[in-house]
Image (cartoon, rainbow, N blue to C red):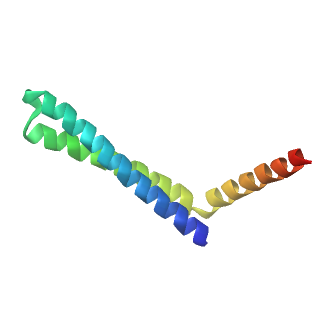
Amino acid sequence: MKRNILYVLSLLIFSWILLIFFSFIIALIISQVSELKGILARIIDLFTGLAIFIVWLLIWYLVVKKSFYERIKKFMNKIEFLQIFMAY
């Protein structure tokens, strides 16, 4: 359970880094085009933040959902078994 919480927190931090990065890129594009200043810039920035937040919610839902987490754990166990098998 502790690993699951740490995984969700790392996804949260990563998603906020992506949010800041894409907001910076869009702000840079908007500052280069003088016609897009004002309310249109705020609308584009709002939709960018909303899209990244929706993607974060989707990732969070898939990770927290028990069956998806169990499938990932089983897959990782198979990889560990293959690594042990190949070592010998």
Q: Is residue 79 left or right of residue 1?
A: right
What residue sits 28% from the left and 48% below the top?
49
Which residue extends farthest bottom?
A: 2
Position of residue 4 in the picture relative to residue 52 (left or right):
right
- Pick out the residue farthest to the front: 87
Between 87 and 44, which is closer to the camera in this rendering? 87
The residue at the point 12 percent across, 37 percent down is 40
User: In x, y percent, where is residue 27?
Assistant: 20, 39
At x 43%, y 58%, the residue is 12
Seen from this angle, which residue lies furthest right?
88
Count up the numbered dots.
0
Q: Position of residue 57 (x, y in %)?
A: 42, 55
Q: Nearer the viewer, residue 64 or 27?
A: 27
At 77% across and 56% down in the image, what residue appears?
Answer: 77
Position of the N terminus by quadrant: bottom right
Side of 86 relative to 14 (left or right): right
Question: Can you tell which quarter of the image residue 41 is in?
Answer: top left
Q: Identify whether 66 is placed above or below 52.
A: below
Side (left or right) of 22 relative to 11? left
Q: Is residue 31 above or below residue 68?
A: above
| Position in image of residue 2 (x %, y %) | 59, 72
